[in-house]
Image (spheres, rainbow, N blue to C red):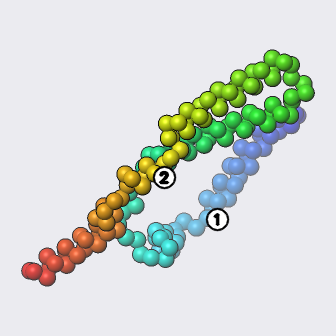
Amino acid sequence: MSNLIMYFCFVPLFTATLMVINNRLGVKKGDPAKVSPYECGFAPVGTSRQKFSVSFFLVAILFLTFDLEILFVYPFAMSLCHLSLLGYWVFIVFSLILTVAFVYELGIGALNYATKASSSSLTSSQNSPRDSNRTKQEANKENSSQE
């Protein structure tokens, strides 16, 4: 039996075995402290559904794109002595396309997410979820004290 066939038989069997063991021996219910949300030792305040800039996702996607470039650079470097002149120029064109894309990305300011987020994000204290929650609590106290 070849190693690849053995690998494809062993990995699913091993995974299924670990899942069954976890299902049988794992704790079904956690204690209240374990299942409660944790915020640095403080009681949770407000909701976790806060708006944030989409620029963070853009930077993550761009990072993955240029990180995958390194995935292609390593095999090229390892097989450079076996490549023909055509292989060399294909890689040069690949690198130039990615370099142009990176320069364009810098030119449009896609990586300047910190300045975009700080200028368009929470400017007044009333926009902060914690502060707005406090102001709601204060308003509720005032309403209850007036009654």
Q: Quadrant of residue 100?
A: top right
Quarter of the image for the N terminus: give it: top right
Residue drawn at (37%, 51%) of the image: 120
> Closest to the observer: 48 or 106?
106
Q: Quadrant of residue 9?
A: top right
| Outermost residue to the front | 107
- State whether residue 4 is above or below residue 19: above
Q: Which residue is mark 2?
A: 114
Whether residues under marks 2 and 1 lie with C-beta atoms below 8 angstroms apart, the answer is no
- Left or right placement of residue 103 versus residue 95 in this view: left
Q: Position of residue 145 (x, y in %)?
A: 14, 82
Disc tally is 2
Pair 2/1: label in front? 2
Residue drawn at (46%, 51%) of the image: 115
Residue drawn at (46%, 68%) of the image: 37
Q: Amino acid at mark 1?
A: Leu
- State whether residue 1 is above or below residue 41: above
The disc placed on residue 110 is none
- Left or right placement of residue 42 versus residue 46 in this view: right
Q: Quadrant of residue 46?
A: bottom left
Residue drawn at (58%, 67%) of the image: 27
| Outermost residue to the bottom | 145
- Element carrying mark 2: helix
Q: Which residue is mark 1?
A: 25
Which badge, 2 or 1, comes first in the chain's sequence? 1
Q: Amino acid at mark 2?
A: Ala
Q: Position of residue 87 (x, y in %)?
A: 80, 21
